[in-house]
C-alpha cells in the first residue's frame, strides 16, 4: 500500500473532475480521479492514506451511499463533500456520518485546498494513532494470561501484596510477573503503564 | 280524335253486350233447324220403311194365298170349273185381290175369275215372267201393268202349280193399284206430303196425289237412278207436277219395291221463315229496349257529370259551392269531396295568410339581419339589417348591389356561394365574413344563405349576425390564453430552478477551479498547462451559454411556430435537460424510441413543455418510493396514423375518479401545485392537433400519453 497521502476525486462530470484535479495538483497534491463511486470502490483505495473529495449527487451510487460504504472500513479515508446545491438537510446528514467538510459548488480553490490539507493531516494523525494502538495491542497480546491478570490488578492501583493475596501466591512471584510484563509493554514506570492500558487496553480490545 | 259522349259509349256497351247473345241465338237457331231437318229426314225415312213393310206384307199375303190355292186338289184333278168357283169364293171372302188367273207354259190363260168359266181368255202378255216361274219354280211379283180386261193398273203375284214335282201352271192373283193406295190413305199422313209406291222399275203403283194421272207412269229417270244406288236416302227433287220437294225413300230388300215420300220444300221453308222472323223480332226488341235504357241512363250520367262542372269552376275560383242534384253515387262522392276540398282550401288559405303574416312579422322584427337579393341586387332588408348597416331606411339599401357592402376580402367567396345556389333550392352552411358599414367601418358577421323563391322568381335569402363584439372577445381570449401559457412556462421555470442551478453550476465549478489552478500554475511559470486550462475554460463557458440559450428558448414569450418536429429528438432533448434533476431525485429514466423518426407538425418548444411537465409529475408521483424503485419510461411508438409519446411511471397511480379531473384547471393533488400544469398541457396538445390523456397501468403507476397525427411528408 502506498503510504504517501493522495487525494481521491469522485465526480460524474468529466469537466469538473478535470478542473478540480488540476487545482489540487497545482497545490501539490497527488490526485487520482474517478468518474463514479463504483470505479473508486473497485480500485481498492478505501483505506488508503489521504482523503476523498466526493460529489454528492451522481447517477447510480451517490455520495452518501459511498460514504456509508467507506464507514465499514476501520481506517477509511476522510470525506469532503461537494454539492451542487447547498441542501442543508443533506449537509447535516453527511456531517453526522463523519464527513470532514461539506462544500458547495462552485468551490473556492483555497477553501478546497485548505479542507484537503486538513483532511490529510487528520487522516495522518488518525493513521498514526491507529498504528500506535496496534503496537500496544500487539504488546498486550504477547503477555501470558498470568502476566495479564497481574497487570490489570496493578493498573487498578493494587499493591504487590494485595495482588499476591488476590491471586493466592506470594509477593515475590508477583514481582517477577510485574517486571516481565513491564518489559514486554516497553514501559519503565507504573504510571506510563496505567496510561497505556487506560487508552487502548480495555479488556474487550484484547 | 274527338271524345265520345257518355251516350255513344253506353250504346256501344249495349251493342257489345247483346251481340254475342244474338250471334249465339242465330247459331243455335241454325243448328236447331239443321237438326230438325235431319230428324225429319230420319223420321220420314222410317215412315217410308214402315210403309214399304206394309206393302210387302200385303203382297206376301197375296203370295201365301196363291200358294195355298196352288195346292188345291181341283187343279191336280184338272177340275178347272170347280177351281174357278173356289177361287171366286176365296176372293170374295178375303178381298185379297181383284182376280185370280191360271196360265199354262205357253202363255195361254186357262182360267180368269174376272170372266165366267168357259169365256174366251186372252193370252198372257208377260212371257218373260212366265218363263222365269216355269224355269225356277219360284214365286214372282209383277211390276205394274194395265189389266187387259179391266183396263186398270194392276199388280200381280204369281206362284207355280206343281204336279208330280213339275211346274205345270202359273197361278196369279191380281191386286188393283187402288188397293195399295188404300194402304197409303190409312196412314193419316200429312196432307201436303206426296207419297208414292213404286215397283222395281220405278213405275208408280200408288200415289196419294193425282193417282189417276201418275199410276203406271215412271218416276223421273235421275230419281230412279239415285234410288237404285242405295236402299234408303233423301234428296231434293221435283215431283211430276213440278213441285220442289224433299224426297225420302225406302226400298224393300224383299220385293225390290219402294215407298217414296215427298215433302214440299215450300212447307219446310215457311217453317224456317217463321223461326227467322221470331228470332229477328226478338233481337230487334232486345236491342230496342237496351238502347232505350242506355239512352235514358246516359242522359242521367251526363247530367250528373255536367252538374259538377260549375262547382269545380267555383272551387278553382275559391267561391262557395252549389251542387245541383246528381243521379249516381260516384258523382255524389265527387261532389262531397269537392265540398270538403273547398272547405280545406278555405282553411288553408286562411292559415297561409296567417302564416305569411307571421313570417313577415318574424322576418321584419328578427334580431338577425335579413337581406333578400337577386342577381346581386337587394330586394328586401329587415329592420335589423338597416340597423346593422347604419342606414336611415330600407330605401338606402334596396336596389343597391350587395357587393357594395361586402368586404373586398370576401367578395370572391360571396360570389362563389351565390353561384353555387343558382338553380338549386336549399341552404349553405354558415360562414364568417366581413361587411362594410355605411360609415366605412368593418363589421364581422356570420352569414347563412338559402335559395328561396321571392315574388315568383329565385332569390337568395341571407341571414346575418353581427359578431364583431364576439370576435373581439375571442381575440382577447386568445391573448389571455397565450399569457396563461407563458405564465405556466414561467411557473415551470420556478419548478425547474433547482435543475437549472445545477446545470449551470457544473460549468461554473469547472471554470472557477480551472481559473484558480491557472493562477497557481502561472505563479510557478508553467504556461503549457495554463494554455490547456484556458481552452477548457472557454469550452465550459460556451456550455454555460448554451444552457442559458436553451432556457431562454423554452421560456420565450414568442409566437408559436408549428413545423416538422421529430418526436424522438424532442424526447432526447427533454431527457438531457432534466437528467441532473432526475439524478438528484434518484429517478432512473429509460427511453424506448420508435425505430423510425416520427415526424409531427407541432411547436417544438410546446411539446418540450408538455413532456417536461409529464416527467416532473411522474417524479413527484414516485417521491414516496425508495430510490431504486423510482423508474420512468418514456416511449415513442407509431400507432395507426399517429405517433404516441408515453410517460410511464411506477408510482401510486391516479384514483380512477380523478382521471379526468386532473386535467381541469386548479385541480391538484400536490401540496404546492397550482393545478395548472396538466390543464395547460392538454390545451397545448389540442392546439397542436393532438390528444393528451392519462390512465393507470395494469400493475402499478400511471401513464400519460400524447398522441399526435403523423406528418405525411407531402403535406409539409
Image (spheres, rainbow, N blue to C red):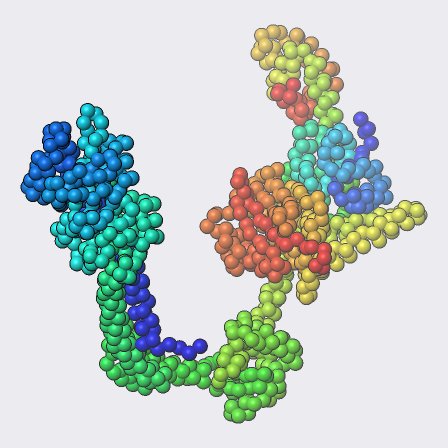
Taking depth in this image into account, of B42 and B244 the one nearest to the observer is: B244
Q: In the shown orientation, is residue A151 left or right of residue B396?
A: right
Q: Residue B586: where, in percent of width, then height? A: 64, 42
**B445 to B222, vertically: above or below:** below
Q: In the shown orientation, is residue B39 left or right of residue B662?
A: left
Quadrant where the N terminus of chain B is found in the figure = bottom left
Residue at 74% over, 21% down: A135
Q: Residue B262: where, in percent of width, then height? A: 24, 55
**B553 to A65, vertically: above or below:** below
Q: In the shown orientation, is residue B395 left or right of residue B590?
A: left
Taking depth in this image into account, of A23 and B652 the one nearest to the observer is: B652
- Choose top left, top right, bottom left or bottom right for residue B308: bottom left
Quadrant where the C terminus of chain B is found in the figure = bottom right
Residue at 25% over, 77% down: B296
Q: Residue B123: where, in percent of width, then height? A: 22, 42
Q: Residue B332: where, in percent of width, then height? A: 26, 75
Taking depth in this image into account, of B313 and B248 the one nearest to the observer is: B248
Q: Is residue B267 visible?
A: yes
Residue at 48% over, 47% down: B655
**B656 to B74, vertically: above or below:** below
Amino acid at each position: 500500500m502506498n503510504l504517501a497521502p493522495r487525494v481521491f476525486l469522485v465526480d460524474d462530470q468529466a469537466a469538473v473532475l478535470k478542473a478540480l484535479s488540476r487545482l489540487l495538483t497545482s497545490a501539490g497534491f497527488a490526485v487520482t480521479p474517478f468518474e463514479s463511486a463504483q470505479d473508486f470502490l473497485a480500485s481498492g483505495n478505501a483505506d488508503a492514506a489521504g482523503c476523498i473529495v466526493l460529489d454528492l449527487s451522481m447517477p447510480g451510487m451517490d455520495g452518501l451511499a459511498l460514504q456509508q460504504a467507506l464507514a465499514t472500513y476501520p481506517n477509511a479515508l476522510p470525506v469532503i463533500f461537494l454539492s451542487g446545491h447547498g441542501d442543508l438537510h443533506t449537509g447535516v446528514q453527511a456531517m453526522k456520518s463523519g464527513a470532514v467538510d461539506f462544500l458547495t459548488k462552485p468551490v473556492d480553490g483555497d477553501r478546497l485546498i485548505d479542507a484537503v490539507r486538513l483532511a490529510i493531516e487528520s487522516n495522518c494523525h488518525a493513521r498514526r494513532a491507529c498504528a500506535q494502538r496496534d503496537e500496544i495491542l500487539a504488546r498486550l497480546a504477547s503477555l501470558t494470561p498470568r502476566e495479564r491478570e497481574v497487570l490489570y490488578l496493578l493498573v487498578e492501583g493494587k499493591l504487590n501484596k494485595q495482588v499476591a493475596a488476590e491471586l493466592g501466591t506470594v509477593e515475590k512471584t508477583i514481582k517477577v510477573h510485574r517486571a516481565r510484563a513491564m518489559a514486554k509493554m516497553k514501559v519503565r514506570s507504573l504510571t506510563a503503564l496505567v496510561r497505556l492500558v487506560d487508552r487502548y487496553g480495555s479488556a474487550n480490545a484484547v | 280524335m274527338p271524345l265520345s259522349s257518355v251516350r255513344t259509349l253506353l250504346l256501344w256497351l249495349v251493342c257489345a253486350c247483346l251481340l254475342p247473345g244474338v250471334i249465339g241465338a242465330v247459331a243455335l237457331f241454325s243448328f236447331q233447324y239443321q237438326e230438325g231437318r235431319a230428324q225429319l229426314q230420319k223420321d220420314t225415312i222410317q215412315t217410308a220403311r214402315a210403309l214399304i213393310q206394309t206393302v210387302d206384307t200385303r203382297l206376301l199375303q197375296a203370295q201365301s194365298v196363291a200358294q195355298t190355292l196352288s195346292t188345291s186338289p181341283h187343279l191336280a184333278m184338272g177340275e178347272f170349273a170347280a177351281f174357278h168357283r173356289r177361287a171366286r169364293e176365296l176372293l170374295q171372302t178375303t178381298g185379297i185381290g181383284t182376280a185370280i188367273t191360271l196360265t199354262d207354259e205357253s202363255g195361254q190363260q186357262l182360267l180368269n175369275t174376272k170372266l165366267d168359266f168357259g169365256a174366251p181368255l186372252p193370252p198372257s202378255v208377260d212371257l218373260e215372267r212366265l218363263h222365269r216361274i216355269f224355269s225356277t219354280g219360284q214365286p214372282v211379283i209383277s211390276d205394274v201393268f194395265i189389266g187387259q180386261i179391266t183396263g186398270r193398273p194392276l199388280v200381280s203375284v204369281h206362284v207355280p202349280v206343281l204336279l208330280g214335282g213339275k211346274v205345270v201352271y202359273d197361278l196369279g192373283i191380281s191386286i188393283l193399284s187402288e188397293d195399295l193406295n188404300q194402304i197409303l190413305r190409312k196412314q193419316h199422313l200429312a196432307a201436303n206430303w206426296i207419297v208414292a209406291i213404286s215397283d222395281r222399275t220405278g213405275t208408280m203403283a200408288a200415289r196419294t196425289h193425282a193417282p189417276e194421272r201418275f199410276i203406271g207412269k215412271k218416276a223421273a229417270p235421275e230419281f230412279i237412278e239415285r234410288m237404285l244406288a242405295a236402299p234408303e236416302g233423301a234428296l231434293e227433287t221435283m215431283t211430276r207436277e213440278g213441285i220442289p220437294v224433299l224426297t225420302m225413300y225406302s226400298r224393300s230388300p224383299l220385293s225390290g219395291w219402294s215407298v217414296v215420300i215427298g215433302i214440299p220444300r215450300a212447307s219446310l221453308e215457311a217453317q224456317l221463315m217463321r223461326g227467322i222472323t221470331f228470332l229477328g223480332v226478338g233481337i230487334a226488341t232486345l236491342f230496342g229496349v237496351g238502347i232505350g235504357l242506355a239512352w235514358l241512363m246516359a242522359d242521367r250520367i251526363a247530367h250528373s257529370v255536367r252538374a259538377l262542372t260549375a262547382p269545380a269552376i267555383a272551387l278553382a275560383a275559391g267561391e262557395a259551392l252549389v251542387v245541383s242534384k246528381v243521379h249516381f253515387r260516384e258523382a255524389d262522392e265527387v261532389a262531397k269531396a269537392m265540398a270538403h276540398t273547398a272547405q280545406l282550401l278555405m282553411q288553408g288559405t286562411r292559415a297561409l295568410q296567417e302564416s305569411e303574416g307571421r313570417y313577415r312579422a318574424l322576418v321584419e322584427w328578427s334580431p338577425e339581419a335579413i337581406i333578400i337579393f337577386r342577381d346581386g341586387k337587394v330586394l328586401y332588408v329587415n329592420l335589423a339589417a338597416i340597423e346593422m348597416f347604419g342606414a336611415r331606411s330600407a330605401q338606402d339599401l334596396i336596389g343597391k348591389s350587395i357587393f357594395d357592402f361586402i368586404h373586398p376580402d370576401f367578395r370572391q367567396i360571396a360570389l362563389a356561394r351565390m353561384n353555387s345556389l343558382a338553380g338549386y333550392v336549399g341552404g349553405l352552411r354558415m360562414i364568417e365574413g366581413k361587411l362594410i358599414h355605411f360609415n366605412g367601418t368593418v363589421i364581422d358577421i356570420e352569414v347563412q344563405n338559402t335559395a328561396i323563391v321571392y315574388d315568383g322568381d329565385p332569390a337568395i335569402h341571407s341571414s346575418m349576425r353581427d359578431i364583431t363584439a364576439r370576435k373581439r372577445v375571442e381575440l382577447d381570449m386568445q391573448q389571455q390564453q397565450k399569457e396563461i401559457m407563458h405564465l405556466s412556462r414561467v411557473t415551470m421555470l420556478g419548478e425547474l430552478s433547482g435543475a437549472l442551478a445545477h446545470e449551470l453550476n457544473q460549468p461554473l465549478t469547472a471554470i472557477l477551479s480551472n481559473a484558480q489552478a491557472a493562477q497557481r500554475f502561472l505563479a510557478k511559470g508553467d504556461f503549457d498547462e495554463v494554455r490547456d486550462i484556458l481552452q477548457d475554460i472557454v469550452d465550459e463557458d460556451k456550455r454555460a451559454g448554451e444552457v442559458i440559450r436553451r432556457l431562454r428558448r423554452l421560456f420565450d414569450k414568442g409566437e408559436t411556430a408549428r413545423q416538422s418536429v421529430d418526436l424522438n429528438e424532442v424526447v432526447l432533448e427533454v431527457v438531457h435537460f432534466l437528467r441532473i434533476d432526475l439524478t438528484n431525485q434518484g429517478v432512473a429514466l429509460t427511453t424506448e424510441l420508435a425505430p423510425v423518426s416520427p415526424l409531427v407538425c407541432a411547436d417544438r418548444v410546446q411539446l418540450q413543455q408538455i413532456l417536461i411537465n409529464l416527467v416532473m409529475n411522474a417524479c413527484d408521483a414516485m417521491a414516496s418510493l425508495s430510490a431504486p424503485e423510482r423508474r420512468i419510461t418514456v416511449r415513442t411508438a407509431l400507432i395507426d396514423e399517429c405517433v404516441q409519446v408515453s410517460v410511464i411511471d411506477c408510482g401510486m397511480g391516479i384514483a380512477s375518479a380523478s382521471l379526468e379531473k386532473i386535467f381541469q384547471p386548479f385541480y391538484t393533488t400536490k401540496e404546492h401545485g397550482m393545478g395548472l400544469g396538466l390543464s395547460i398541457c392538454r390545451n397545448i396538445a389540442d392546439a397542436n392537433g393532438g390528444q393528451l390523456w392519462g390512465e393507470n397501468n395494469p400493475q402499478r403507476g400511471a401513464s400519460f400519453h400524447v398522441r399526435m397525427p403523423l406528418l405525411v411528408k407531402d403535406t409539409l
